[in-house]
Amino acid sequence: MSSTPPPKKRKVLQTFRVEYTQEWPCMLKSHIGPNHAFCTVCSADISIGHSGHFDITSHIASAKHKKRGECSKQMSISSMFAAKGASAEDGHTNKVMYAEALMVDFIAQHNLSLLVANSLPELIKSMCPDSSIAKDSKCARSKSAAMTKELSKVVKESLVDRLKKGPFTISTDGSNDMEKSKLFPIVVRTSDSPKAHKMQNSCRKLIRDILVRFVVPAFGGGNVIEDVDYKSKYNLKHDKDLIIEEMSRVFIENKESNGLNEEKVKDFHKHVKLYFTTCTDYMIKNLPISDPFLKHLAVADPDMIPHSSSDSVRYFAQKFPVLTSETSLDTLLEEFSSLQSAHLPHTCEGSVRYPYPPGGPFADNLNGAAGYPGFNPAVAAVAIHSTTDHPAVSHGGAILSTAHSVPDSGNHVPKPENPSPVH
């Protein structure tokens, strides 16, 4: 008589539950299967099919998990980027980290491939073999990519904060790709500290600095530039009074020993005057010294306020009606007249900053509080708007403004397309 063994019980394996992650945030669903869990602390998959909850509890209590947990608590972002063998408080370590950040910023600023980071540190070490900072710098592609991602957040937050507080312009343009997908980068332009209101005086000073080199003081010193006849031989300095390099002057004084005759010396001075005259012609023709917009914009210059005219206030009120949307033209003129009679400190900022510094662009000296509530924002708005949009300022005074672009990560100074040699 044969007997059959009893049937075996079907073994049921435990599966991963969402409640496990809620109880232990380090436990996630494993890609191996439903009978496993992934521990983010240990970076390992553990089997939970036998007893589920108890398997996870046993793993959490294991020595391996506790050791990994202590290491992750002590690990910080700065320690990941620090040179080996150096503490976070070490000044040398901070210098190394700063150098690495500068290199990453350079790569992003010039839109270079991150593959450059694999060879650039070694190139710097070869160029600067005595530098301990270059020697300890270890920033290849992977580390540069991680730093770029984090630094871009800081740059973007800073740019967005500036856009919230001041005027800006946005432009975009499609790429030249022939495929179905195209790139449309967004470029944002804003101004931190415009100085367009000082541009015309700076241009006139540049021309005057040339005039005083070859025009007699009675004609080139205090007269209006447009009225100076610098081409008349009666208004030019004598040859010996021309402002030339001292070495050249000494060489001419010893003309006999240097093989110079009187004719060559006269020819030299003739060409010096011709050079100065040509430079002056070029600057007067190309610099916006007569631009009416910049002329009236001097009303924003603290040094020129006492010499400015109320016509400048009327000029901008008519050109930009928005300036009188919250205040009247009469109020602007009254505050302007009051400001002219006030004593402006010598430490007054030469640039109209936006947002306004404490006390505004022009502070009320009676109580130190922000004065001229109508004139202050009007001046700042006009100065900043003119820096970014006025064609004369954009071409001739590009060095007087600051531009920012996205996704670029640095503060850059735009260059004119056809830079003038007199700059």
Image (cartoon, helix red, strand yellow):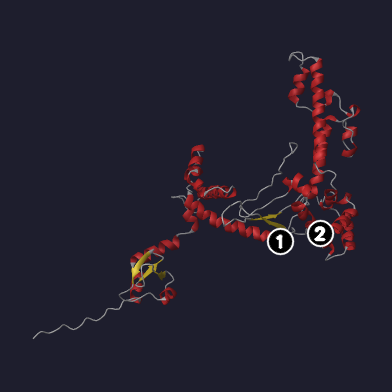
The span from disc 2 to disc 1 (Cα, nearest Å) is: 15 Å
Q: Which residue shows up at 86% across the image and 24% down it?
A: 238
Position of residue 398 in the picture relative to residue 58 (left or right): right
* Secondary-structure class at tag 1: helix
The percent coordinates of residue 233 (x first, y second) are 89, 27
Which quarter of the rendered picture does the N terminus lie within?
Answer: bottom left
Indicate the quadrant where residue 24 lies. Answer: bottom left
Does residue 361 appear in the picture of this structure?
no
User: Residue at (51%, 46%) from the top-left corner?
Assistant: 116
On screen, residue 66 versus residue 322, left or right, reads: left
Residue 252 drawn above or below residue 321: above
The amino acid type found where label 1 is placed reads: Lys
Q: Name the one closer to the observer, 138 or 415.
A: 415
Where is residue 390? Give x, y as percent.
78, 51
Density class for disc 2 (Cα within 10 Å; few <14, some 14-19, many ≥20) is many
In the rendered view, does 408 fall on the left or right side of 282? Answer: left
The structure residue drawn at horizontal position 54% and vertical position 54%, both measured from the top left corner, is 148
Q: Which tag, 2 or 1, sits closer to the chain's start?
A: 1
Residue farthest along the bottom direction in this orientation:
1
Q: Which residue is under mark 1?
A: 165
Image quarter hosting the C terminus: top right
Above or below residue 325? Residue 176 is above
Give me the disc on residue 420. none
Three-letter residue code for mark 2: Ala
Q: Which residue is mark 2?
A: 378
* Rendered image quadrant of residue 60: bottom left
Q: For the residue labelled by badge 2, is the local secondary structure a helix, a strand or a loop?
A: helix
